Image (cartoon, grey):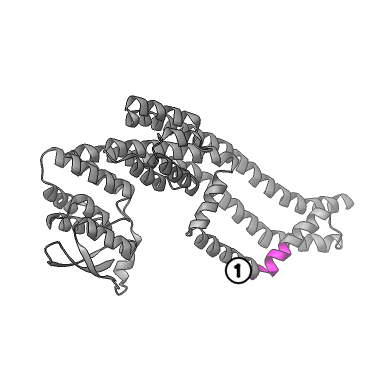
Amino acid sequence: MFTYTATDTSGKRHEGSVEATSVGAVGQILARQGLKALVIKKEVKKTNVLDVFTKAKKVKAKDLVIFTRQLATMIDAGVPLVRSLATLQSQTENPVFKKHMQEVSKDVESGTSFADSLAKHPKVFSAIYVNMVRAGEAGGILDEILKKLALQQEKDAKIRGKFKSAMTYPTVLIGITFTVFIALMTVVVPKIGKIVGDLSGGKLPPLTQAMLGISHFLTTFWYIHITVFVGLSIFIGRSLQTEKGKLIRDQLLLKAPAIKIIVIKMSVARFARIFASLMTAGVSVIDSIEITSKAIGNKVIEAELMAAAKDVSNGEQFSVPLSKSKIFPPIVSQMLAIGEETGQTDSVLLKVAEFYEDEVDAAVDGLSSILEPLLIVVMGGMVGVIAVSVIGPISNLSNQI
């Protein structure tokens, strides 16, 4: 949050607060409102226990979709924007979203455009959302744009939800496997190994000796393992927050054999639907490319699209640089070229989006069906090796008796 003091064209002073990512972003927001910033300060608030719990609760995609659909319905019915926002604000159950809505409603009531009011809350309303609303306001078709925006959000959330749900079971299984391995090696193996070692006079098979060595290393130097694990977790977490870390992560995802296909299809589906939605709203091609590139969530693909935007600004058709891409399938650039020739880029890309959304469903189901039995086999094999290393010496003792 930043507080500001600014003047308008008539010299009248304005004071207020705005949520933004930096001082420069505040200046841009004020400039769009016709204000010249005099003083911009970062607001420092005292930490409150209630505020901590409130911030922990985020605005869910579902809340935003419901708000967008209801707002579109009310505007289509002829309800003024200020009254619509006030009504939806009173119905919102999420306290974080309600607070943002109060500020948006207050700004709109004071004469700020709806898009500029939303732009003050980048953590809730993305650049796609703001630009489509701005285009809808300019064209007088805000209700239609909001309906398309809600549909785009629903489809986007569905794709991400499908991938997350498919990965939940393998993730849980990996966690269980790791926990079982640590429990066996630190609790079960040392006790049984001591008994077997005493009975056999210290003569143990190589496999049993290896397992006891691993067990001894885990139990004796446990503080080293915990330190390394915590240190790596913090390092990886912080690295993924940097631009270089995100780029490395995305490069690895695009090289992973099974994951690569899903990542590409998800990215193409999101690209096609978001770009089509922006084009339908009347946003320029270059702006649409730049906004879409940042919304996909992959730095490698973002770099490709930003390079394509430069070619488009130099007079080339978007399909030309896209056809040279090593990530986007050829069918995408070919369909885009057809759309550019016929003047129906948005409708053609919507068909591409629907096709790849179905492809994502099939790919995720296929990956899930492969991973689940594979992880079960790995888990069974791990437990089997530990069991053999313990049971082997016992069976040898029984044969000697």
Horizontal relation, residue 4 to residue 197: left or right = left
Q: Amino acid at mark 1?
A: Thr
**Nearer to us in this view, 121 or 27:** 27
Residue drawn at 66 percent across, 57 percent down: 184
Residue 9, image x, y percentages: 14, 61
Residue 161 appears in the picture as rendered:
no
**Nearer to us in this view, 279 or 77:** 279
Magenta span of residues:
215-223
**Position of 12 relative to 387 (above/below):** below
- Residue, far right: 400
Residue 350, image x, y percentages: 36, 31
**Nearer to us in this view, 398 or 385:** 385
Residue 286, image x, y percentages: 35, 42
**Position of 157 relative to 40 (above/below):** above
Residue 26 lies in the magenta-colored region: no
Question: Which residue is label 1 attached to?
Answer: 227
**Disc 1 element:** helix
Which SS type dominates the magenta stretch? Answer: helix
Horizontal relation, residue 100 to residue 155: left or right = left
Residue 219 lies in the magenta-colored region: yes
- Residue, far bottom: 46
Residue 378 appears in the picture as rendered:
yes
Q: Quadrant of residue 260?
A: top right
Q: Quadrant of residue 333?
A: top left
Residue drawn at 52 percent across, 38 percent down: 327
- Residue, far front: 314
Residue 283, image x, y percentages: 29, 41
Mark 1, Cα crowd under 10 Å, few <14 / some 14-19 / many 20+, is: few
